[in-house]
Amino acid sequence: MLGTDIRGIMAEEEEVQRRRQALKSLLSMRTKQLRESLDQRIKRARTGGDWVSLSKEECATLHRQERAHLKSQLEQLQHEDDRTKGKLTALKRAKARAQRIRAAEAASGRKRR
């Protein structure tokens, strides 16, 4: 009966799907930031109150550092998304297996009667 806990599997599947959606959102946001040019970044930073007193060279250095950090984050997020996708696939298989077991149990119960 342990392998047929469909409700538990479905709850975990929903949780993993929410996590995957959040990861996709983060990946999208980080990719957008990575595509941002230096001039766009300077404009965004200055309207936000950052980088106001920095020279263009200092801004360029910070921008390069941010891009390196974003690339690292993107790699980590992509790896985590791949793991989550694998877990989701395994949960779907487990759910299908549990449903087959339940159906077989129900069919064998009807045959006995």
Image (cartoon, grey):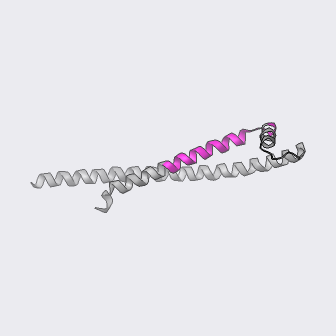
Q: Is residue 86 magenta?
A: no
Q: Nearer the viewer, residue 22 or 100?
A: 22
Q: Nearer the viewer, residue 19 or 45?
A: 45
What are the residue bounds of the magenta stretch?
Answer: 18-39
Give percent across and percent down for residue 102.
25, 53
Q: Tell me the residue at 43%/51% (across/down).
A: 13
Q: Tell me the residue at 54%/50% (across/down).
A: 82
Q: Residue furthest bottom?
A: 2
Picture quadrant where residue 57 is located: top right
Give percent across and percent down for residue 39.
81, 37
Task: From the image, give the main secondary structure of the stretch colored magenta.
Answer: helix
Q: Tell me the residue at 15%/55% (across/down).
A: 109
Give percent across and percent down for residue 2.
31, 62
Q: How many marks?
A: 0
Horizontal placement of 1 versus 64: left or right?
A: left
Q: Quarter of the image containing the N terminus?
A: bottom left
Horizontal placement of 20 versus 70: left or right?
A: left
Q: Quarter of the image containing the C terminus?
A: bottom left
Q: Nearer the viewer, residue 99 or 43?
A: 43
Give percent across and percent down for residue 12.
42, 55
Q: Is residue 31 magenta?
A: yes
Q: Tell me the residue at 46%/52% (across/down).
A: 15
Horizontal placement of 13 versus 26: left or right?
A: left
Horizontal placement of 13 versus 84: left or right?
A: left
